[in-house]
Amino acid sequence: MEQVRGRWGLLAYIVVLMTCFNFFSHGTQDLYPTFLKVQHGFGSGGVTALTIVLNLGAVAGGFVFGALSERIGRRRAVVLASLLVLPMIPLWAFTATPLLLGAGAFLVQFCVQGAWAVVPAHLNELSPPGARGTFPGFAYQLGNLFAASNAFFQARLAEARHNDYGLALAIVCGVVALVLALVTWLGPEAKGVTFGEQG
């Protein structure tokens, strides 16, 4: 941890950032099958089909925003993806037909995983040169730990409102998208750093 000494502020920032990212991802995916089954009465076939659609959106978003971050920077790409998800939330959480739900699932995951596509490069660029294996991995896992309560929180929120999972998904997605955009925008960027340099 020699390389981390004196960079505790950076470590704390990245842990907060990864907590936001993990809430963003898990908050839009973990209870989505439950939302489809409980709130909309979909069987396993319908849930599987819509899960495939959302994963196609995730892959497409990863390609688009990963490439875009090379042009406009890591922070701008994450902020853009985070804010673009906001107008997609009503389509994703409050419609009822398979076609509209599928469109919403595709678009939301396009944005969510588009933001996530920037994470590997961004974390490694921000990490101290001598700790590019340990530093991002440790910060990532702490963020994951702090976001682990998400499914429990969303389920309780939904159950308290007569199993309104759509509302629980929408609240978490919307709030976290805004917080992630703010935390990212206020943070550092090291795009273009030369790996191997000591600093």
Image (tube, rainbow, N blue to C red):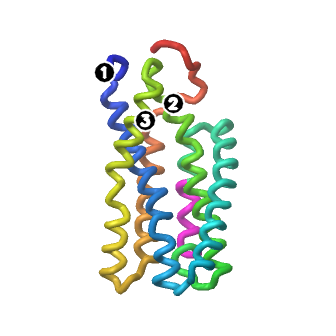
Is tag 1's residue or tag 3's residue first in the polypeptide sequence? 1
**Which of the marked residues, 2 or 3, is nearer the chain's N terminus?**
2
Q: Secondary structure at mark 1?
A: loop
Q: Residue 21: image x %, image y %?
A: 45, 50
Name the amino acid type tagged 1. Gly
Q: Is residue 174 visible?
A: no
- Please report whichever mark, 2 or 1, sits nearer to the chain's N-terminal start: 1
Corner quadrant of residue 137 = top left
Q: Nearer the viewer, mark 2 or mark 1?
A: 2
Q: Are marks 2 and 3 in contact (CB under 8 Å)?
A: no
| Magenta span: chief secondary structure | helix
Q: Return the x and y of residue 188 as percentages of the image width and height.
A: 46, 33
Q: Closer to the observer: label 2 or label 3?
A: 3
For this rendering, which residue is in front, 21 or 177? 21
What numbered label is drawn on residue 6? 1
Please report the residue visible at 34 percent of the width from the left and 25 percent of the height from the top. 7
Magenta region: 82-91
Give the secondary structure at mark 3: helix
Q: Is residue 156 visible?
A: yes
Res 9 → quadrant: top left
Tell me the residue that label 2 is attached to.
124
Mark 1 and mark 3: Cα distance apart in space: 18 Å
Q: 83 or 122: nearer the eye?
A: 122
Cα separation, mark 2 vs mark 1, equals: 18 Å
Q: Are marks 2 and 1 in contact (CB under 8 Å)?
A: no
- 94 vs 179: above or below: below
Query: Is residue 11 left or right of 38 when viewed as pictured?
Result: left
Which residue occupies 49% across, 34% down? 123
Image-based side of 23 in relation to 104, left or right: left
> Element at badge 2?
helix
